[in-house]
Every structure is written in C-alpha cells, then in structure tokens.
C-alpha cells in the first residue's frame, strides 16, 4: 500500500485544533481510497520557543526534508513571542528553504456560506510568489531614534524568481479557464514592477492559449470586490498576493474558509499545506475554531500527491457539510461537530 | 468679496468632462454663498505632451504656486503617452513639490447608491501618505535582459514623513469618532513597517483621547469588506493607502463616487483636489462620465478654504441627486443630466 510520510506542525493556538480535525479527515480519506498517511508530529511553536529559546531545533529543516509533505496549523502568539521572531523562526524559513515558491489560494463560496458581497458567482485561484520580492528582508535604519531617522526596505525581484512564478501562473490558467491576471503597480514602482510586466509580456508568447491581462494592485483590489466573477487565475508578488488572498478570504466568507498550499513545483523538497488563518489566541482551546480551511488545505495536499479521487471526496464532504449549514456560519458550530459531519459525509 | 484663485487642470479623457461639471457647481455654490472663484485653466495633458514634448512647461510648478488651490481632472492616456511619463511628468511632481503629504479619501455610500457589499453602514476616512514610502522612485536593475537580472525597488520612510502623516491622522480621528487604524505589515517588513509602528506608539501618548489600533495591510483589506462599519479613520503609507482607497472606492459603489484631496496641511503651497478615478480613455467624449467624484472633491476644496456652509450645500445637493436615483447607477445617466440635477438642488 502506498504510504505518504507527513510532518504535522500544529503550531500555536487554534492551529492545534484544526490540524487534529484535518488529520482525522485525511486519514479516513486515505483508508477509504487505498493508501495510507504516516504522521510524525512536532511541537514547534511559541511554547516550544519559551522552553527552548528557538522555534525549532537547529536541524529542524533537515528533519522536515525527508517528508513527503508538511501539514501546518498556525504559527504565532504575539503576547508570548513577537511575530518577527516566531514567523521568521518557523513559517518563513520553511517556505524559503524548501523553495515553496508558489503559494496557491483558492477563493470561492462553499455551498451554504453567505459572503459579504451581494454577488456570489466567482471562482478565483490566487497564486502568490512566496520567496522574495517585498518580503526579502533587506533594509535598515539610520540615525535611529533621532529626528533624522530614515528606514529603508528593499524589494528584490530576480529573473528566476519572477519567471518561475509567472510560468506557474500560466500553467494553472491553462488548466482552468485560460485567463491569467498579472498584478503589479508599474505606474508608481518603475523598477520592480516594470520588470515583472516585461517578463509577463515575454512569457505570454509561449502561452498563446492563455489570455493574460496586467492590472495595477489598486484596481485589482477593487475588481475582486466589484467584479470577482471576471477573474480566473491571479498571479502576484509576495506582498500583493498576501493582500489579495486576505481579500479573497474575505469575499469567500472569512478566514475560516481560506485554504492554502505552499508548493515546490519541482518537487525537490516537501510542499507545505496550511490554512490562511492565524493562531487566533483569543479563541484557542475553546473548541470553536472552524477546521474547514485546514481540511481543505489537506485536500490540496492529496491533490498534490496525485490522489485526486480522495481529494475530490474530501472536498465533496466539506461541501456536503456546509450545504447542510454546518460550519457555514462563523462561530456557530463547534470544531468537533463540523469535523464529525465531514467524516460522516466521507462515508 | 472674498475671491479664491483656482488653477484648473482638466488633464486627459473624462478629466475634462468632470472638471467642467465640478466647476459649474462650485461657481454657483460660491455665488450663492457670498464669495467668488477665479479660474485659470491649463491644457497640460498627454495631448499637450504630444505637441510640446513635456507634460507641463518648465515653469509649471512655479505657475501653480500662486494659486489658492488646484482642481485636477485626470492624468494619463497610456496609448498616447506611457503612464510612467505622464504621471511622473504632472500629477506626482505636483503632489511632491507642494508637499501635499496627506491624501484624504472619504468612503461612504451616498443615498440611493447600492454598493457591492450586503452591509452599507460605514463611514471611513482614509489618509494616505503622499510623498515617500514605497513610491519614492528609488531602485534599479542589474544584468538587464540576462538570466541573472535583478530589480530592486526601495521604500524610503523618513521620521519627518511618517510623523507628520500620523499626526494628521490623529487630528482627523480626534475631529471624528476618535478611532485611528494605522496600517502596516510589520510581521514581514521589519525595517520600514516596524519603524512606522514605533512612531505610531510614541505619538499615541500625545493623543490619549484617540483609540489607535495597528492592523496588518492584509487584515485591513479583509476588514474593509467584512466589517467596514468598525472603521473610522485609517492611516497608511503611500502604497497601502493607494490600495485601500481603491478598495474604499469599490465598497462605496465604484470610482465614480470616490473623491480625494491632496492636502498641504501647513498651507505653505496650494493643495490639489481630484477624483480618484483616472481618465478612462474608453469613455472619453461620450458625455457619460459620472461627475460626482469630481464635484465631491470640489466640496472638499471649499471645506479646505473654510467655506463650510458652501461645502455642506454642495454635499447636500449631491446627496439629493443620488437619492433621486440620478447618477446613482454607474453608466445610467449622462454627465450633463447629473450636473444639472446637482445645480438645481443647489437652489
Ligand atoms: C504571518 C505572515 C508572515 C504571513 C505572510 O504574510 O506570509 C501570512 O499573512 C500569510 O498570508 O501567510
Ligand atoms: C495614477 C497613480 C500614480 C495614482 C497613485 O497611485 O498615486 C493613482 O492610483 C491614485 O490613487 O491617485
């Protein structure tokens, strides 16, 4: 029997609840579909930091490298450990070390979920560059604490980095409805974003079957609210993708429904699957976190393994659950009740 | 009789139609309220560029300096002149030369206007830093055209620049409902945005009556869609403010309703008033541009002059117009019909 080795990183706060829920669903889906999932769980988190002085051991990345995939809950608990430490000590290093350059986030309304928009006919796949750009971490501050202080933060875009994420976007568009929206701000950022636009233009010749349109980030943010049904695949830089995917989560009814995959398309290292939401310390341990985003992220993991039947079954079970109104209204149902419903829909 | 000298810059495309409409309303409002407006119009635009090789004459800025305010339509016509030339040749130099560091944009639904959100009870004032940050124009490209190409774009934040926009935000919050949202991304941009957060923290001690909260840009974008009624004044950097104000325009029903003021709070140079929308070449000269954003921007100019009665009268006339359904549905009414309705509501 085919076995996939999964590293579980429940992390902080509700990350623990939703990872447990997702795991129960994934294991059952595997069993029903003739493969198995073998989990090893690691306690790396802010609590781990408080005990050990680091978010993960020095060989953490090497430990993770041997797995087929990573399932992550959420990282961060600002009152215990500053985000700048926790995120830069666990989540972000994994994305970079494993060259998970494509962060994929689907945005559509699940049945039974009422979003904030009057319109509900949209199905968007956002693809966010996940390793460089505005989150390169390059910068500094001079004359700190004085009136003359200046802070600079430098966005760094490499041809390799831009080309590979755009290619990934073109491929995804080709596999969907053939429309790619590339998001920049080239009228105001004339180095980085003009460069991105040029690469988009050049690559478009190789994908004559894909209709590519460039949008400014401000116009795209408005479009996601005014005309989300006009969009298919949206590809954007690290920062722009970060913003657009929270907006995507909002229009799909909230972070409880927003799944994501950090993909290494070359499969030279494990990919990582995580809900978009954070650790939500205010509701940690109350048993009321919505596990749907985590379960959906797990379905994306099965899809990544090529287990498409099992992935489709998990998605159908999520949809059957929300269609019955369970887990469809933020805060209404308990984590366990939602998980139980998905499990029973699985058969 | 008090007279204000106004430089009119209709600019490109529908900028011409909406500026003419706004001017008719403002002139009548002045006449009815005991002051006068004295206009000088300049043809600076992309057409001007095609004839003269520049967006404005070399002494353009000096010419504008003697006015009490500038009323601008829209700049840009990409098929005639690249945005990077037209915007950097007219709009952006004015904002910077006249230290119009506060770009103010109100977001609320006019009566009769149906926005894309189910919820309609919001009244947000966005304040965007308008002179530095992510649009500083600093950067470059190396190994251009080769596989090793790297493009960098540097955001530059000065203490003076950050402090003055935040102070402006605190003052505006104090004059409204006492709530200030400061928007950064300090968990991923640890130089520029951590600096902004620190200045926000320090200044908050001087404004104990203002409740200030820091949000990440991604969370704020989601909040503007999920819970816009929770917001009062929002202050953000040049890029973040740019994105949030297009989103604000979207939730208020579209760019046809989004007004803005580029303010020099020290009054050491003229401020500039302009609708958020662009020149919309596709509908130029069809007489169907919605002049409401431009008229509203004109009302902000009267407010800036301290002509509050006249400003209130213009706003009431806009509201009476949209409440009757005129100009309330994008694309339905002609520019002239909307303008006539506002004029007649003025009395
Ligand atoms: C927590 C934060 C660093 C992270 C990011 O910006 O990448 C999050 O917002 C996300 O979208 O995954
Ligand atoms: C046209 C462009 C340079 C401008 C900006 O980003 O400042 C516009 O988007 C705006 O919001 O005023």
Image: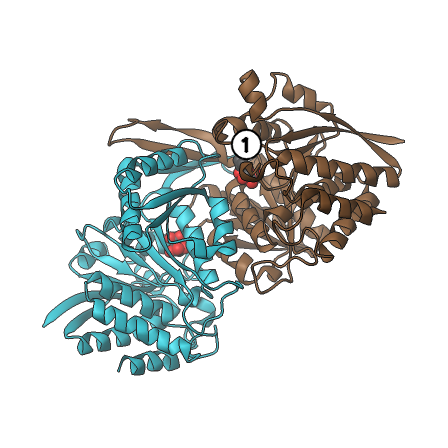
Chain colours: A cyan, B brown
Residue at x 60% of width, y 54% of height: B253
Residue at x 34% of width, y 82% of height: A340
Task: Say if A340 sits above or below A226 in the image.
Answer: below
Position of the N terminus of chain B, as image quadrant, is: top right
* Near-viewer residue (B313 or A238): B313
Q: Quadrant of residue A122?
A: bottom left
How many marks on residues? 1
* Residue B26 horizontal/vertical position (percent): 78, 38
* Residue A235 horizontal/vertical position (percent): 36, 48
Residue at x 72% of width, y 40% of height: B298
Task: Say if B130 sits above or below A78 in the image.
Answer: above
**Which residue is farthest left?**
A1
**Which residue is farthest front?**
B286
Question: Where does label 1 land, which residue?
Answer: B76
Q: Callout 1: residue from which chain?
A: B
**Ligand 2 has an atom within 8 Å of the beta carbon of the residue at disc 1:** yes
* Residue A208 horizontal/vertical position (percent): 28, 42
* Near-viewer residue (B254 or B61): B254
- In terms of secondary structure, where does tag 1 sit? loop
Mark 1 is surrounded, within 10 Å at the Cα level, by few (under 14), some (14 to 19) or many (20 or more) other residues, namely many
Residue at x 40% of width, y 69% of height: A110
* Near-viewer residue (B275 or A103): B275
A234 lies left or right of B82: left
Q: Quadrant of residue B167?
A: top right
């Amino acid at each position: 029997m085919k076995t996939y080795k999964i590293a579980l990183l429940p992390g902080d706060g509700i990350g623990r609840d939703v990872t447990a829920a997702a795991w129960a669903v994934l294991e059952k889906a595997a069993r029903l579909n003739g493969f198995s999932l073998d989990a090893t769980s690691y306690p790396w988190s802010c609590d781990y930091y408080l005990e050990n002085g680091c978010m993960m051991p020095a060989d953490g990345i090497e430990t993770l490298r041997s797995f087929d995939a990573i399932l992550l809950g959420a990282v961060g608990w600002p009152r215990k450990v500053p985000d700048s430490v926790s995120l830069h000590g666990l989540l972000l290093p994994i994305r970079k070390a494993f060259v998970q350059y494509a962060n994929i986030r689907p945005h559509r309304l699940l049945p039974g979920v009422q979003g904030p928009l009057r319109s509900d006919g949209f199905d968007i796949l956002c693809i966010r560059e996940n390793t460089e750009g505005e989150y390169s971490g390059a910068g500094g501050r001079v004359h700190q604490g004085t009136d003359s202080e200046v802070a600079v933060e430098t966005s760094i875009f490499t041809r390799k980095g831009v080309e590979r994420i755009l290619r990934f976007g073109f491929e995804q568009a080709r596999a969907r409805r053939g429309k790619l929206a590339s998001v920049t701000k080239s009228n105001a950022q004339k180095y980085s974003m003009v460069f991105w636009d040029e690469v988009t233009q050049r690559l478009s010749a190789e994908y004559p079957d894909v209709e590519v349109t460039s949008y400014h980030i401000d116009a795209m943010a408005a479009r996601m609210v005014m005309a989300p049904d006009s969009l298919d695949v949206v590809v954007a830089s690290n920062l722009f993708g970060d913003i657009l995917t929270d907006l995507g989560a909002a229009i799909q009814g909230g972070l409880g429904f927003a799944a994501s995959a950090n993909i290494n398309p070359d499969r030279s290292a494990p990919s990582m699957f995580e809900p978009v939401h954070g650790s939500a310390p205010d509701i940690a341990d109350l048993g009321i976190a919505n596990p749907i985003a985590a379960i959906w992220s797990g379905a994306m993991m099965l899809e990544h393994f090529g287990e498409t039947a099992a992935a489709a079954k998990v998605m159908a079970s999520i949809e059957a659950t929300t269609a019955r109104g369970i887990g469809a209204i933020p805060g209404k149902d308990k984590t366990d009740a939602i998980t139980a419903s998905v499990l029973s829909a699985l058969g």
